[in-house]
Amino acid sequence: MITRYKPVVLFALPVLLAVAALAYAHQGGIHHGPDDSRHVDMHLTHMAALLDKIDASDSQKSQIDGLLRSAFTDLKAAKDQHHAAFGQFHELLFAPGIDRPRIEALRAQQVEALDEVSRNFVKAFADAAEVLSPDQRTALARQIRAHHGG
């Protein structure tokens, strides 16, 4: 019985883990992740306010905005692509014949795509952190911890 649902579990488990990790990291309200331009703008406006508090220069704020805006845009595109792939997954599951190799290929492609977007997202944040001096990063960390109640 379990092997019957193995493709579903293998496809869904990495996705569920990624979503759970994002939800845990950004608990509460809109912090579940920006998925449209309004949410992206809200996050970037909040970041700009935090950067003002640590006396980041206009050049630093502009660089960081560009890096993070691009990362959020890529995340939205990945979410849209994943949604389309999930539709393909449903089509494969409900077809007259079950094509296990195609299901596995789709699962593997989705894991690879999610890994790539995750890698790029983290890289963008690391690149943004490097724009700041060590003292500014320390001050920003204090601001973020205070904002999140830590």
Image (tube, rainbow, N blue to C red):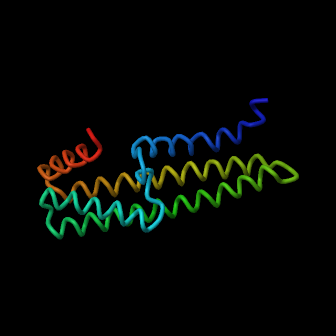
* Location of residue 22 in the rendering, given as x and y in whole percent from the top left corner: 45, 46
Of residue 116 and residue 139, the one placed in the foreground of this image is: 139
Q: Residue at x 51, y 64 (%)?
A: 77
Q: Residue at x 17, y 70 (%)?
A: 58
* Location of residue 83 in the rendering, given as x and y in whole percent from the top left corner: 61, 58
Compared across the picture, whether 38 is left or right of 17 comes to: left
Of residue 125 and residue 109, the one placed in the foreground of this image is: 125
* Location of residue 18 in the rendering, given as x and y in whole percent from the top left corner: 50, 44
Of residue 116 and residue 77, the one placed in the foreground of this image is: 77
Question: Extreme right residue here?
Answer: 96
Compared across the picture, whether 122 is left or right of 96 comes to: left
Residue 62 in which image quadrant: bottom left
- Number of numbered labels in the structure image: 0
Compared across the picture, whether 55 is left or right of 90 comes to: left
Compared across the picture, whether 77 is left or right of 10 comes to: left
| Whether residue 7 is situated above or below residue 31 in the rendered picture | above
* Location of residue 118 in the rendering, given as x and y in whole percent from the top left corner: 44, 51
